Image: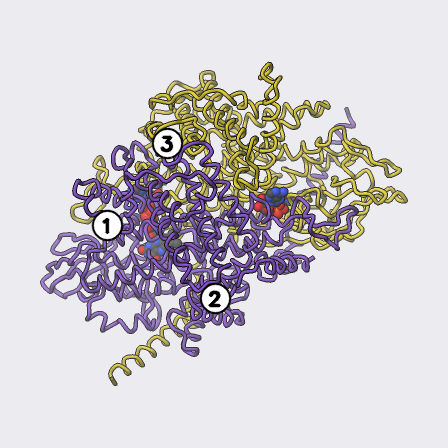
Chain colours: A yellow, B purple
Amino acid sequence: MSDQQARDLSAARAASGLDVRALGLFVHGDSDTLDSRTRISQTLARDPLFAGPAPVSRPDVYARSMAQMNRLYDLQETNGWTEHDVEAAMGMLGEGTGMTLHHSAFVPVFLAQASPELLKQFGTLVRTRGVIGCYLQTELAHGSNVGGLQTTATYLSESDEFELNTPTPGARKWWIGALGRTATHGVLQAQLILKGKSYGPHLFFVQLRDTETHAPLPGVTIGDIGPKVHNAWRATDNGFASFEKVRVPRTWMLSRYAQVTRTGDYVRPPHAKIAYGGMMYLRAGFTATAGWTLAKAITIAIRYATIRRQGALDPTSVDPSVSIPGAPVLEMPVLRYPSTYARLLPVLARAYVLIGLGRSVIATFKAFSESLANGDTSALGEMHALTSALKVYATNTAVRDIEVARQSMGGHGFSAAGGIGRIWAQYLPSVTFEGDNFVLDHQVVRAAVKAHARVSQADFKSQPSSLSPSSAYLRLLSASPPTFGSIEDWGDVRKLAMLLEMRAARVVAARASSDDDVHDPGAAARVSNAVAAAFVGVQVADMADGLDSSGLGKREQVAITRLYVLFLQSDLESGLGDLYQFGLLQGEDTGRTLRRALGRTCMDLLPDAVVLVDAFAFQDWELNSALGAADGRAYARLIERAEEDEMNVDEEHARMVFEESIRPILERGRRMAVKELAAKTKL
Amino acid sequence: MSDQQARDLSAARAASGLDVRALGLFVHGDSDTLDSRTRISQTLARDPLFAGPAPVSRPDVYARSMAQMNRLYDLQETNGWTEHDVEAAMGMLGEGTGMTLHHSAFVPVFLAQASPELLKQFGTLVRTRGVIGCYLQTELAHGSNVGGLQTTATYLSESDEFELNTPTPGARKWWIGALGRTATHGVLQAQLILKGKSYGPHLFFVQLRDTETHAPLPGVTIGDIGPKVHNAWRATDNGFASFEKVRVPRTWMLSRYAQVTRTGDYVRPPHAKIAYGGMMYLRAGFTATAGWTLAKAITIAIRYATIRRQGALDPTSVDPSVSIPGAPVLEMPVLRYPSTYARLLPVLARAYVLIGLGRSVIATFKAFSESLANGDTSALGEMHALTSALKVYATNTAVRDIEVARQSMGGHGFSAAGGIGRIWAQYLPSVTFEGDNFVLDHQVVRAAVKAHARVSQADFKSQPSSLSPSSAYLRLLSASPPTFGSIEDWGDVRKLAMLLEMRAARVVAARASSDDDVHDPGAAARVSNAVAAAFVGVQVADMADGLDSSGLGKREQVAITRLYVLFLQSDLESGLGDLYQFGLLQGEDTGRTLRRALGRTCMDLLPDAVVLVDAFAFQDWELNSALGAADGRAYARLIERAEEDEMNVDEEHARMVFEESIRPILERGRRMAVKELAAKTKL
Ligand SMILES: Cc1cc2nc3c(=O)[nH]c(=O)nc-3n(C[C@H](O)[C@H](O)[C@H](O)COP(=O)(O)OP(=O)(O)OC[C@H]3O[C@@H](n4cnc5c(N)ncnc54)[C@H](O)[C@@H]3O)c2cc1C
Ligand SMILES: Cc1cc2nc3c(=O)[nH]c(=O)nc-3n(C[C@H](O)[C@H](O)[C@H](O)COP(=O)(O)OP(=O)(O)OC[C@H]3O[C@@H](n4cnc5c(N)ncnc54)[C@H](O)[C@@H]3O)c2cc1C
């Protein structure tokens, strides 16, 4: 039996003529990235600390995870891994750790915003992890509304210090990753109070625990906030903390931009939002992460759908093992059902697009950071609008699509051994943290409406090129839509991207002219999505144009182009309501033709699906999936895992449950049955 | 602080003039149901076995769950609870148990399909739980394709027995609830083999374990299949089993319909699909379950959104507790943001609709079962189409909406203490079991296309009343659409329902005339949804008409009518793409007016939201939510739970992790920092 699944997956690989190495280089960017990633993954695969089964209790999961991190830093030292290598390795673990926030938030915020003195004092230790940090912003009662945070940092001119206080129970810091059990230090958001006046939230470096004993410092009360939904984020010690008269030197305020003088006077930052650079750095990373997370899920789902045979007979196959008379051929691989590939192939396309787009967003962000470091704040608004829109778009997409992939696996998709459940649960809070998506939607809409107002000004028409990339679609405000008659029209990436842009232009114009949130309470999410889809659409068209110089062979270019086309078709299909409402499309047949085109793209991609997921190059231990392993032996692995399960090994426990609960149920039942039968006989 | 939240929730209750008791009677159907439910829940709330914290390991969770079931049956005996009361109590547990499949599948299938002899022998014991049963259909390699099941039941005429065998590893029974550790007996689907010929799958009663020792019988290999995603379904021992030469008497084939004679000849059932009655019974229950599950989630979300204040200031409020200078008023309850209530109020509406609809579906099904018992099979096709369409519609809706509710709670929604995560994960497999939704979609579409073909026949027009309820929408195939000009038009339930019907008619006609799965691979899900929405829409309009005689007061009738209107508006809004594509609506403004109407309905409902969820009458222990308790004290409860968390209590464990992992990380960091600084100094 397990041979059949292995044969099916090999056959699928053989049937595609694509070069998996070439595709791997394309999707990873270059051979250094791909090869070092593979080398690191293989190193960890050999180490039972990484690839072994997870412990049962949360404290033990946390303990193992910290041991893994210690090992990773050890490997870094002995193997000369770069910081980037370590972070790649952390990504492979598939869950956050007590060190994640140090890397992702504490270090970048500290380095970007500490004053030169503080950097000199702590910069090296922060980078080498001689202190371990966290990022303390959210409070029990305040998250989205940063301005409403209630922790105070009051300047005491007598001692040239700030005093940190948690004035109410709701002002406790809450949700802070790595705070519960790990961090020795942190960066704290608190209301800056000078001479009795509040200057709004500012960041302060603070020590939380003794670095020798790890005990909380006097005045600091700390703990873990407890388990999260779906047993996710078990290894991360999200914590709470309150502060009572904790003092830090004045220089510990992160004062690269805003400052407080010795006399307790406030020095404004050069640009009101300049400190948002750090936040944006985090947000800029979301697109790539969404892409890679989707890649993992879709690898599992497509491999499983290739070896899962169910339903209609596949006349091209023969099954030697079946013993039921009259059933000599195998069933269809479920991937070949239209209603299955229509779910999975667009997800594959989105994984490829988000990975590619993620790389260019990070490059754009780096360029922006450099200008910012040189004092040029002109692109702040644009970067904010762009990273917000993409954060919402990428995270909503990935959360939806990972679950689509899981559901495609039928019953076995609900088994923890399938692996996708874990990926989804771990990814899920991305829609909430670093800006709740529904709160960010409003900011995207606000930026779009502002850009629309500028465009509508009389003098705009002379300089349409002044539009920023995130609002370039507005140039098409009054353009008339291209016609889509044939299936071929729906295969032209530029045309498809332009239709997404026109949609965005109409949706934003409608919003700007007449609708508001009260009248159309669902508008923000819709408008924000249309704006992001337009930007992404254009990027996809650019990526398609870039394929010629990608070094890919012809066949691979064709396959990648199909993914891009499918991406755009799928986005347009889900936007048909807008497209018709705003008159960008007309007539019943137009939508039907789009769907036929989408169906054809899927058919064309189908034979290459397995190789396209192989190119992501995940090792089996990373997928941690009985159903998605590279050799296809799904059923054999499910059986192995079940036989070892903790529910099956403890006979004493089984006897105990039988005696305490099952036997009493059965005996009561027999007693009642005897009574019932006796009553009947009496009648 | 916690006082503020309690005050907010009380104030919200006081501000609505609705009668919560009257609404409770309406939603529960009658006072007996509501009052006995409340009495039972209060009984369990007092028992630490039910309301206490869950154990950590799965075996212990299973053990506690079986102890709970034993206690419930005890309470049943001592308090004279009906079987219905026991099942209501099981529903309150919020998770399946080792006894769930006995109630939901084993008993109904056995009672409906066993022969009179077998019923006489085992019927009473089955009902009193003198044996504990499971339903063994799915195999490792076969689920959706029941015809492909490979377990065999071969008739041996020598001994007048069937021999049961598992011919291949893929033929192992798999996923079977209650099999892993609990069941003593089961109903088994196996290929019936007579004289070397297969007659397809049939059901057999089979003993699995000794009722005295609980050891598996000879030839039976059993175990638990292991954990499920998201730590869900922990208490249910879904299991695997294989059979080697296991014999059962001929009379143990469930032969109320199909039979095997002493000579091994096959006697056909009166109707090919008559045995599906049992399956349908299970499916008929899905609508109500979806409704009540949604009700639980939305109770939590709406209460929390009422006490969570965040963002813009609410000028009507004053906060005495804030110590930051210049912030005397409270922020807005997040429920008052349009983008929050636009997400939550339609979910509330769907909970009310699915609960009401669920009650009528079960009534319809009961009437159908009685005719079936009298040999009338005429309604089989209709019941199959209807229960399939509603199963897909209700489960897809609830899975989507519960997560919408969770996301609405921001960060705290990701805490396990929030409670909605658990509700979602437990509900999630409903989209897969009892017919994978994507497989069922095809059956719904097939039935719709068949009905369409009949309607298109020339002689149909003379008797349009011959349409069954599930295809009644086809009478409107060539009707011209009503006009929707004003906001008021969008408030007329009959008109809204008719528009949903017309949409279904157009979508089905298009499908029947030209599209197929290959050309439009996403069609099945879309068509199936349109068909179900049309049926549900008409039911909602009927429910609205029935309000006059519901015994509800005027104000309550108005509120419930608003829920029904919002339900229909929301369904139409998500169908705008179809409505425009098929020319049922025209012009940009029409869609905008629908959205304005929807916005207005939301505004009207907003002040009553809390009372409308109170009417569901869940007790706090059932919600098991720090955020959704009836008194509103969300923050206080989060703090309590965090302080007791297992991550915070074991100091020895904390010291161990520090010494083994954290200290080495810090020391390595300091060493590296010293090295780096030394290197710098040298330069
Ligand atoms: C796993 C995880 C890890 C985290 N790690 C950290 C960390 O390390 N450090 C840290 O500081 N924080 C952390 N957080 C907290 C996180 O940043 C916040 O939860 C997030 O910013 C959302 O804020 P909130 O919880 O206050 O949501 P809320 O603002 O309370 O949102 C509740 C609801 O109200 C709506 N809403 C709120 N304001 C508005 C508005 N103005 N307009 C319209 N609608 C509104 C939202 O859309 C949402 O539906 C973490 C959270 C999670 C889940
Ligand atoms: C929590 C849980 C409890 C369960 N309890 C029981 C139990 O007590 N007893 C029992 O017997 N079983 C039980 N099951 C099994 C359940 O009934 C099956 O998993 C379910 O019927 C789906 O079948 P499958 O797993 O074979 O899915 P598959 O058929 O393998 O589905 C895989 C994919 O293929 C697609 N697909 C399959 N066939 C077709 C087709 N013909 N056309 C188009 N697409 C197709 C599906 O849509 C899906 O995307 C349980 C399952 C779960 C998750």
Query: Up-down: is B88 above or below B610?
Result: below
Mark 3: secondary structure: helix
* B627 horizontally vs A533: left or right: right
- Residue A129, given in percent of the width and then of the height, sits at 68, 39
* A262 horizontally vs B650: left or right: right
Measured in 3D between alpha carbons, the distance from the residue under mark 1 to the one under mark 2, in whole angstroms, is: 55 Å
Residue A67 shows in the view: no
Residue type for callout 2: Arg
Task: Say whether mark 2 and mark 1 are on the same chain.
Answer: yes
Task: Name the outermost residue toward the right.
Answer: A158
> Mark on residue B465?
1
Label 2 crowd (10 A; few <14 / some 14-19 / many >=20): many
Residue type for callout 3: Ala
Task: Name the outermost residue toward the left.
Answer: B263
Mark 1 vs mark 2: in front:
1
Mark 3 vs mark 1: in front:
1
Mark 1: secondary structure: helix
Residue drawn where x is 65% and y is 45% of the image:
A143
Camera-side residue: B582 or A273? Answer: B582
Camera-side residue: B627 or A661? Answer: B627
Contact, CB < 8 Å: mark 3 with mark 1? no
Which residue bears the numbered disc 3?
A609
Residue type for callout 1: Ser
> Mark on residue B64?
2
* A360 horizontally vs A309: left or right: right
Measured in 3D between alpha carbons, the distance from the residue under mark 2 to the one under mark 3, in whole angstroms, is: 45 Å
Contact, CB < 8 Å: mark 1 with mark 2? no
Label 3 crowd (10 A; few <14 / some 14-19 / many >=20): many
Quarter of the figure with residue A443: top right
